[in-house]
Image: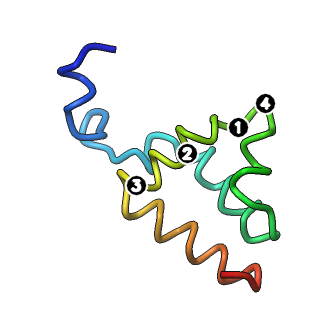
Amino acid sequence: MSVASREAPVRARGRTLVEVRAPIVRRVCRRVAAGETIEAICRDPLMPLRQDLHDWLAEEPEFAAMVKAARGRSGRE
């Protein structure tokens, strides 16, 4: 990945990261709501690496809010 592309906003053809990666975002949120931690979810080889997921949470407030809401539904904060 070039430096220029890393500095560009996280968007693909006008869509946010959450929209582009919607299936993964939904799976992460479902699993968090079921009580799993991000670390446990990221041990699954079909899920993103832990650092990637933490980067997404830092870069995308919408995704961070979705995960926070899922944690609330799980009964843990």
The residue drawn where x is 35% and y is 51% is 59
Residue at image mark 4: 45
Q: Earlier in the sequence, mark 4 or mark 2?
A: 4
Q: Are marks 1 and 4 in contact (CB under 8 Å)?
A: yes
Q: Earlier in the sequence, mark 2 or mark 1?
A: 1
Q: Are marks 2 and 1 in contact (CB under 8 Å)?
A: yes
Residue at image mark 1: 47
Q: Position of residue 45 (x, y in %)?
A: 78, 30
Q: Earlier in the sequence, mark 4 or mark 3?
A: 4
Q: CA distance from mark 4 to mark 2?
A: 13 Å
Image quadrant in which you'd find residue 30: bottom right
Q: Amino acid at mark 2?
A: Leu
Mark 4 surroundings within 10 Å by alpha-carbon count, few (fewer than 14), some (14 through 19), many (20 or more): few
Note whether 72 is above or below 59 in the view shown. below
Q: Along the line of sight, which residue is nearer the eye, 73 or 50?
A: 50
The residue drawn where x is 34% and y is 47% is 16
Would residue 10 be found to the left or right of residue 47 on screen? Answer: left
State the SS at label 1.
loop
The residue drawn where x is 22% and y is 40% is 9
Q: Position of residue 73 (x, y in %)?
A: 70, 82
Q: Position of residue 38 (x, y in %)?
A: 69, 55
* Count of numbered badges drawn on the protein: 4
The label nearer to you, 1 versus 3, is 3
Residue at image mark 3: 58
Residue at image mark 2: 53
Q: Position of residue 41 (x, y in %)?
A: 76, 49
Q: CA distance from mark 1 to mark 3?
A: 18 Å
The residue drawn where x is 34% and y is 14% is 1
